[in-house]
Image (cartoon, grey):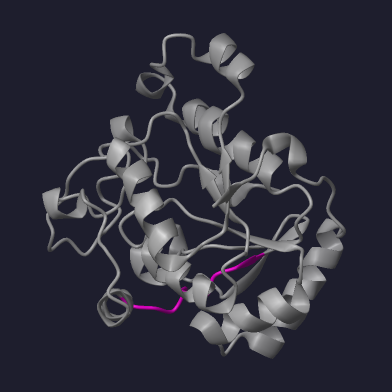
């Protein structure tokens, strides 16, 4: 497994906001009827060759997209945000999936240590300002990780609800383009990918965690819940960490 160092990541994007918006519209018109591997292949090998990456939380559903990407290109850069607040089981699961799928280009990004010392010296910022905590531990590291890329693949799905209800398969994201190959997949479609490819489950899923992020802000939920993200920032208005608002 190749773990990319932060200093090795290339910088600079090639599109303006207007160019990204126009290109996303053209790509959606051309490929908007596709999903899964059928969408991933032209994005990786034709439209954004060498300028596309993907993000993965290595959570309960992450193996589905990772498996499809591995069928297209096992060397595609996979960005993993190590917030320093993740469950130990998530790290072990990441290693298991990387080995089983043969992924060769995992790029682990961590928060800036100096910024953490200044803004979250006791590691308890999540208790008073979840938005700022997410920014320090996820948003800012991802901003650094995305430098040099014009597009990135995400595992978001419409059935997760909330702001994802009308998620397109291709969308502009500031100066980049975001590709959502699983946008139209239903819960049973994800289950089919797991079963047909004999993918392992995240070890915490059996304990009632349907969506897994950082340890302090992730709770168990009813396994029959239609809201798979109900355990994220439970009791708060917050439903997203903020990485999908990056410009």
Q: Residue shown at 47%/64% (left/top)?
A: 155
**Magenta stretch?**
178-186
Is residue 193 part of the magenta span, yes or no? no
Measured as percent of width and height from the top left, residue 12 is found at 85, 48
Q: Residue shown at 48%/27% (left/top)?
A: 133
For residue 123, say whether it is visible: yes
Q: Residue shown at 48%/71% (left/top)?
A: 166
Q: Residue shown at 46%/59% (left/top)?
A: 163
Answer above or below: position of 113 versus 15. Answer: above
Front residue of this view, candidates 144 and 240: 144
Measured as percent of width and height from the top left, residue 36 is found at 49, 81
Answer above or below: position of 98 versus 234. Answer: below
Answer above or below: position of 23 versus 175. Answer: below
Measured as percent of width and height from the top left, residue 45 is found at 71, 79
Measured as percent of width and height from the top left, residue 6 is found at 69, 36
Considering the whole magenta stretch, tell me its main secondary structure: loop
Task: Tell whether 211 sits left or right of 172.
Answer: left
For residue 35, say whether it is visible: no
The answer to which quarter of the image holds residue 195 is bottom left
Q: How many marks?
A: 0
Task: Tell whether 238 sits left or right of 192.
Answer: right
Answer above or below: position of 119 versus 173. Answer: above
The answer to which quarter of the image holds residue 150 is bottom right
């Amino acid at each position: 497994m190749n773990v990319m160092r932060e200093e090795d990541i290339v910088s600079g994007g090639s599109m303006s906001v207007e160019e990204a918006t126009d290109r996303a519209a053209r790509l959606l018109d051309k490929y908007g009827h596709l999903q899964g591997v059928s969408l991933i292949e032209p994005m990786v090998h034709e439209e954004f060759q060498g300028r596309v990456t993907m993000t993965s939380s290595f959570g309960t559903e992450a193996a589905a997209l990772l498996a499809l990407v591995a069928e297209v290109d096992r060397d595609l850069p996979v960005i993993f945000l190590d917030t320093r607040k993740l469950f130990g089981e998530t790290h072990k699961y990441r290693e298991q999936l990387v080995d089983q799928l043969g992924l060769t280009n995992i790029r682990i990004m961590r928060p800036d240590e100096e910024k953490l010392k200044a803004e979250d010296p006791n590691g308890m910022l999540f208790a008073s300002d979840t938005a700022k905590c997410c920014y320090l531990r996820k948003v800012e590291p991802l901003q650094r990780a995305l430098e040099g890329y014009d597009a990135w693949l995400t595992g978001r799905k419409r059935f997760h609800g909330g702001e994802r209800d009308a998620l397109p398969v291709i969308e502009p994201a500031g100066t980049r383009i975001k590709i959502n190959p699983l946008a139209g997949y239903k819960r049973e479609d994800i289950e089919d990918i797991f079963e047909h490819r004999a993918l392992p489950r995240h070890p915490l899923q059996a304990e009632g965690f349907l969506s897994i992020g950082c340890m302090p802000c992730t709770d168990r939920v009813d396994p029959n819940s239609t809201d798979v993200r109900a355990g994220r920032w439970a009791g708060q208005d917050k439903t997203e960490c903020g990485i999908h608002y990056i410009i």
